[in-house]
Amino acid sequence: MNLEKFDGMNLAKSQIAEMVGKAIEKAVSGGALEEKSPMKEFTVEIPRDLKYGDFSTNAAMVNARSFGTNPRVIATAILENIDFSGSFFDRAELAGPGFINFFLNHSYFESVVKAVLENKENYGRTDFGAGKKYNVEFVSANPTGPMHLGNARGGALGDILAECLAWSGHEVTREFLINDAGNQIEKFGLSLEARYMQIFDESYPFDEKFYQGADITARAREFYDIHGDEYVNKPLEERKQALIDYALPRNIADMKKHLEKYRISYDVWFSEQAMRDRGDVDKAIKTLTDNGYTYEKDGALWYKGTALGEEKDEVLVRANGISTYFAADIAYHYDKLVTRGFDKAIDVWGADHHGHVARMKTAMKALGLDENRLDVVLMQLVKLMGDARDENGNVILDESGKPKKVEIKMSKRTGKAITLVDLLDEVPTDAARFFFNTREPNTHLLFDLDLAIQENSENPVYYVQYAHARICSILRRLERESLSAEGVEKADLSLLKEKEEIELIRTLSYMPGEIISAGKAYDPSKITKYSITLATRFHRFYTACRVKCDDENLSKARLALCVATKYAIANCLRIMNITIPEQM
C-alpha cells in the first residue's frame, strides 16, 4: 500500500462505498434484490458511539424505494454478498431499522502509524484540492489607521485557512487588498491636512467626520518635522496630496511590519489605485455593459442588479465621472477570477459586510462568471476579556471560585481602543493565533487575555505545545535508558491493542480528514480543536501504558506511537504557524 499522503478515514469510507456497491450488484444479479428505480447515493459516517462499529452506512435505508422492500431485507442481502478481502474491515452487522455497521481490523491501525512515520513532517497533506488555484484575501485593513481586534481575528483565521487549503492540495495565494483609493483616502488626506495646519493655528477647523485618532496627529507632526512650514501657503489640494504621499506608504509599511510580527506573510499586496490606473475598473464596467447590466440615469451609470433579483440597482459611475467602491470591488474580483485565473476567490470579511455578499455574487453572474467561484467568510466580533480586579489589584472571584471576567476595551499602554500591536505587546503571538481560531468564524469570540498569558494546562495552546515537548522529553529520557527511537518504523505495531493505544491511533487517523474539512468548511477552528483532542489522547495513553516495559517488542511499538504522535502534533502547530517546542 502507498502510504504517501495517506488519508486513512477517507480511504476506509471509500472502501465501504465500493464494497457495498459491489455487494448490491451481486445481490441483484443473484436475484436477492430487484432494482425498480435508480439507486440513491448513500453516506458512510462515523457513529457517535464506536462500540456499535467504526463506520456506519445508510445504504439500505435510502434505497428502500429503489428496491421496493424493507431496508432490513436490503441490508441483509448486502451483508450476505459483501467481500471484505483486501480491505481494512473484517466484519459488518445489521443494526436498527437497516443501518450497516462496519468494524475495522488491526491492519488499519498499523497502517495509520506507519503512514505517520513514513510521511513525518508531511503527514496530513493530501491531493484533495487537485492543484486548483485558490486566492484567499484577508485582513485588507483600511490603511488610514492602525489595525484593530477584528483584523487580528481575520488575520489568524485567513492565514490558517490558507494553510489548511494548501495542505489539502490546493495552490494557494494569500492576498492583501490595499484600499488606497476612494473616499477613505480623501478623508485621510483632509484629516492629515487639518492636523498639520493646526500645528500653526490651533483654531484651524477639524471636521468631526475626519479621522480622530492620535496616529493622524503623529503623522502630521512627522511631516512637519521634515518640511516645517513649507506647505502652509500651498494650495489645499497640493498640501493634502503631499501629506497622503508621505503618510500612506508609512502606514502600509507599518501594517506589513505588524503582520509579520503576527507571522503573516502575503504573496500579493494588491493596490486598488494601481488597478484603477490600469483602467481595470473601466474594463469591468464595459463587460457589465456588454452583458446588458448597466443603464444611464441622472447623469450616472447604474448597475442593473434588480434584473438578477437584487432589491435595488447600484451606481457604478457617479455623475461627476468618478467610479464607486462597488465598481472597484467588481473589477477587483474580475481581476482575480478572469485576469489572474483563480479557480476560486475566498474573502474574509467582518459580519458588518453581510449585505454586500449577495450583491457581489450577483455581480459575478452579471460578468458572466459562476457566482460559486466567489466565497465570503463572515466573521463575528471579538470581545477581549480579562480578570476583574478590585481597587487593590486583587482578582475578584465569581460564585464558583473562578476569576470573574470583564470586557477590556482600552489599552493599558495608550488608554485608547486596543489595536493589533497593543494585543501582541500583551499576548504571545502563539496564543493570539491559537485563541482567535478556537471558535467558528461565524460565532462571537471571547478572547480571555489573562488565560492567554498563562503557562499551564488551562491555556489550550500551552496544553498542546506541552504535549509535544513532553514527547520530546520522553524520547530523550528513553534514549538515556537505551531505548532508542531509531528504527521504530520497523516495530511490530500489531502489539498495540490497549484501548488507549487504539484511541490515540484512531485520533491520528482523523488528521488528514480534519485538514480537508477545515478547508472545505472555511473553518480553521477544526484544527485547533483537533490538536487539543490529540494532545488529550496522548496524555491518556501515556498515563495508561508504560512505554518502557518488560516486553522489548511492545516497548518499541509504543515508542513508535510516541514518535508518530510527535509528528502529528508538530504538524498541527506547523499549520497554525505556532512554535513547536522541544522542552518547556
Image (cartoon, rainbow, N blue to C red):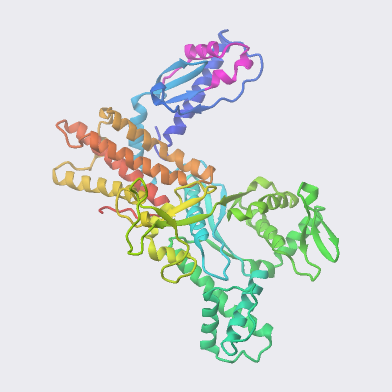
Q: Quadrant of the N terminus?
A: top left
Q: Quadrant of the C terminus?
A: bottom left
Residue 288 lies, in percent from the top left, at 77, 56
Residue at the (52%, 75%) spot, across then down: 215
Horizontally, is 287 left or right of 275 in the view?
A: right
Quarter-wise, where is residue 85 in the image? top left
Q: Is residue 499 visible?
A: yes
In front here: 353 or 528?
353
Q: Which residues are magenta?
A: 58-85
Residue 416 lies, in percent from the top left, at 48, 69
Residue 224 lies, in percent from the top left, at 54, 87
Residue at the (52%, 16%) spot, across then down: 98
Measured along the vertical axis of the image, is residue 84 above or below residue 188? above
Residue 536 lies, in percent from the top left, at 33, 40
Residue at the (14%, 42%) spot, across then down: 482
Q: Main secondary structure of the magenta part?
A: helix
The count of marks equals 0
Measured along the vertical axis of the image, is residue 488 above or below residue 463? above
Horizontally, is 157 left or right of 580 in the view?
A: right
Quarter-wise, where is residue 28 in the image? top right
Quarter-wise, where is residue 197 in the image? bottom right
Taking the magenta stretch, the answer to whether it contains residue 236 is no
Measured along the vertical axis of the image, is residue 194 above or below residue 287? below
Taking the magenta stretch, the answer to whether it contains residue 82 is yes
Measured along the vertical axis of the image, is residue 353 above or below residue 34? below
Horizontally, is 486 left or right of 350 in the view?
A: left
In front here: 130 or 445?
445
Q: Is residue 127 visible?
A: no
